[in-house]
Amino acid sequence: MKSMMLFGEMLLRLTPSNHQLLIQANQLEMVYGGSEANIAVALSNWGEKTSFASCVPNNNLGLAAIMQLRQYGVNTDFVIQKGHKMGLYFVEQGHSIRPTEVTYDRKNSAFVEAMPSDYQLEEMLENVKWIHLSGISMGVSKQAREVTLKLAKLAHEKNIKVSFDFNYRTKIWGIEEAREAFLEILPYVNVCFGSYLDAFTIHQLHGKGIKVETLEEKLAILKDFCKEYGFDAFFTTDREVLENNVQNLSCAVVTSNEQHILGPVKVNVLERIGTGDSFVAGVLFGLNNSYSLTETLDFALSSFALKHTIVGDFQIASKQAVQDFDINGGHVVIKR
């Protein structure tokens, strides 16, 4: 049985309790996470065979990160232990009118410093049917970008499905550098995740005064983008802030000749981080299990919405919980 592989940096997340700011806090809650690790855990939790490739420090923090993944059934044979620093990020949880703020401390981490020669790329892909990559890995360092691109090219040569999430982070790199990297990897991508803003980045349309307001207008841009690069599909989410922490969540998929929209689902946000990864995981699960595009969206939107109610980076809702979630329902009852 071949696995779904995720490649990226695993991070240690540190969060003040009770929505405090860092300047107020005298203790921090600690959990592990990171985009690709989050997806690996969710997929494994739903019964998929998954493997995670990365580099963590050769110390107790790195070992603890590996053990976290193993706890959820993720294969860690291709997680290298080398170096001394774990990538960190600090989260000040927002509330009401104050947004959540993320502060990274990942410079010179084990993953950032790892060289392409540290990875056994051929061996990593030997029993893989799908690999998921993201713009985050391309942004943290030149060597991580090189590994990501090599994996995409090699997977493409081996007819392994490649999915890619733009995941642009302004705190990691500039938009022009990101554009150059995206242009390199997109020819090898089968399934893409992002928004119309990523298409704007590729076509250098930021600041051109183009107004895009409705979801239909956004999808029209993505459909053209899908045709341009020959993606099997492009998946996106849409978020409408209603009041305080209450939001409407929607999602959509476009191909070269069709589109589907699902939602909105109204949620009261307990946790914002990891929700996009939960959507990606839901899509990958649906596609890997031969769901139709509409069935895939249903599962992905359910996962996306439920993760807003779960603290921490990982989506730990069971497959049954995701399948049972009624995206059209307005009532929550006690399950006895």
Image: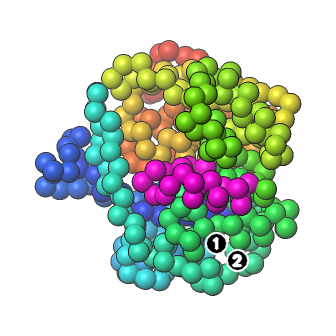
Disc number at residue 96?
none
Q: Is residue 205 visible?
A: yes
Residue type, label 1: Val
Farthest residue to the front: give it: 208
Report how far apart the C-alphas of labels 1 and 2 lie in the structure.
8 Å
Q: Name the residue rendered at 68%, 38% in the picture.
A: 235
Residue 37 is situated, as x and y percent measured from the top left of the image, at 53, 59
Residue 173 is situated, as x and y percent measured from the top left of the image, at 49, 58
Q: Which residue is mark 1?
A: 147
The structure's colour scheme is: rainbow
Q: Which residues are magenta?
A: 166-186
SS for dot 2? helix
Q: Is residue 314 visible?
A: no
Labels 1 and 2 touching (C-beta < 8 A): yes
Residue type, label 2: Leu
Q: Which residue is mark 2?
A: 121
Pick the front one: 128 or 214: 214
Q: Is residue 176 magenta?
A: yes
- Mark 2 residue crowding within 10 angstroms, few (<14) / some (14–19) / many (20+): some
Pick the front one: 332 or 283: 283
262 up-or-down from 13: above or below: above
Q: Is residue 24 magenta?
A: no
Farthest residue to the top: give it: 330
Pick the front one: 40 or 11: 11
Q: In this image, 89 relative to 26: left or right?
A: right
Image quarter of residue 282? top right
Q: Where, quadrant-wise, is the C terminus in this rendering?
A: top left
Residue 136 is situated, as x and y percent measured from the top left of the image, at 54, 57
Q: Name the residue rendered at 77%, 33% in the picture.
A: 223
46 up-or-down from 296: above or below: below
SS for dot 1? helix
